[in-house]
Amino acid sequence: MSEFIAITFDDADQGLAALGSVRALEKDGKIHLKDTAVVTKDADGKVSIKNESSSGTETGAVVGGVLGAFLFFIFPVAGIIGGAAIGALVGRAASPGVDGTFVKEVADDLPAGGSALFLLIKGGDVGLLIGA
């Protein structure tokens, strides 16, 4: 079962710094992430979203590449288009990742100069994040 955590910060750099701390926990094998996103809003109100690839995207790319290569030998143009389409569908079904609509809603509500960190956790000791 996955757990979703969203944390907002008053400083634009704190979201990325917190992600670095969480990645250190992941590297140590104490937590397992499915997807992450960091949103920052500069002083002028411009929003930047850094959404890392989820495992569903990776799965879709692999499946699409294999199917596309196979179909390419039989139907060259259809193989490329079909592989990409099937890969996208498989990726979406395999793991939807962090909800983009929710990320946008939080980004709209961030104060100028603020940031937010979104974590989709697939395992490990979530309690360690309190001190991260």
Image (tube, rainbow, N blue to C red):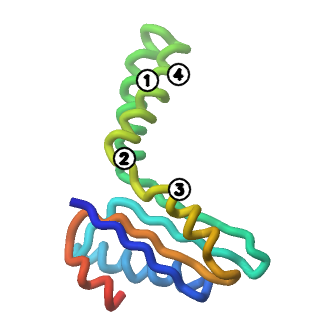
- Give the answer, above or below, for where 75 lies relative to 50: above
Instruction: Tell me which residue sits at (51%, 81%) in the image.
Output: 8
Question: Which residue, given by chain and number where applicable, does mark 3 sit on?
Answer: 101
Instruction: Give whichever of discs 2 and 4 has the lower sequence position.
Output: 2
- Give the answer, above or below, for where 60 lies relative to 86: below
Instruction: Give whichever of discs 1 and 4 has the lower sequence position.
Output: 1
Going by the picture, which residue comes out furthest to the bottom?
Answer: 131
Question: Which residue, given by chain and number where applicable, does mark 2 sit on?
Answer: 56
Instruction: Give whichever of discs 3 and 1 has the lower sequence position.
Output: 1
Instruction: Tell me which residue sits at (37%, 78%) in the image.
Output: 22
Instruction: Give whichever of discs 1 and 2 has the lower sequence position.
Output: 2
Question: Which residue, given by chain and number where applicable, does mark 1 sit on?
Answer: 68
Instruction: Tell me which residue sits at (40%, 54%) in the image.
Output: 97
Res 81 label = 4
Instruction: Give whichever of discs 3 and 2 has the lower sequence position.
Output: 2
Instruction: Tell me which residue sits at (65%, 67%) in the image.
Output: 48
